[in-house]
Image (cartoon, grey):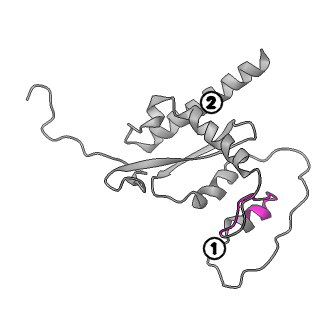
Amino acid sequence: MCGRLSHPREKGGADIGASPVDRRKTGSKHHLICDGRGTPLKVIITVANANDVTQTLALVDGIPPVAGRPGPATQASGSSARRQRRPPPRRALRKRRILPVISRKGAPNIQGLGKLRYVVEQTFALLHPFQRLAVRWERRTELHETFVSLACGLICWRRLKKHRS
């Protein structure tokens, strides 16, 4: 057998699920929140078929509060005709004094929303040149989360270094 295992290890690991794009493959997904300049603040790793909306509050709650006076509170407008089992992310974000800028289903597009989305996509583009993040090789989620955190730290350090010089 010359150095090969007779029983190869099973593929996958925790936080690996079916890919919504290619049904034969499994994978994981990075959920990211960043500031207005694209500096990553919090990253969460989930199964590939997890909906982004389910991780919104976890990302927002993962950022420590900023000292100082909070801005003006926004009021929730309208009421839901049908009863919902869990609070929708829009209402929960408004309770945290965050104004959600997400276009509703069937509503006209919000002008300038592409500029906001571009910042997040740019941050993902900064993360994926790190080869261990573009394709997940680790079975253990903790290792992959550590590499993601290191990559975010390097991005922040590079921006700070660039800003100081």
- 146, above or below 16, in the image: above
Residue placed at 62% from the left, 30% from the top? 153
Q: Residue 155, image x and y in percent? A: 63, 28
56 displayed left or right of 11: right
Q: Secondary structure at mark 1?
A: loop
Q: Residue 126, image x and y in percent? A: 59, 32
Q: On the rendered image, what quadrant is the N terminus found in?
A: top left
The region drawn magenta spans 92-105
140 displayed left or right of 157: left
Which residue does the numbered mark 2 point to in the structure image? Answer: 153
44 displayed left or right of 131: right
Q: Residue 145, image x and y in percent? A: 51, 40
Question: Which of these two is toward me, 144 or 48?
Answer: 48
Marks 1 and 2, how far apart in space? 34 Å
Dividing the picture into quadrants, the one containing residue 157 is top right
Residue placed at 41% from the left, 39% from the top? 136
Circle on res. 86: 1
Number of residues whose C-alpha sits closer than 10 Å to that of mark 1, classed few (under 14), some (14–19) or many (20 or more) = few
**Amino acid at pointer 1:** Arg
Q: Is residue 93 magenta?
A: yes
- Mark found first going from the N terminus, 1 or 2: 1
Question: Which of these two is toward me, 139 or 56?
Answer: 56
- 118, above or below 158, in the image: below
Q: Secondary structure at mark 2?
A: helix
In this rendering, does residue 33 appear at all? yes
Q: Is residue 157 magenta?
A: no
Question: Which of these two is toward me, 1 or 75?
Answer: 75
Dividing the picture into quadrants, the one containing residue 2 is top left
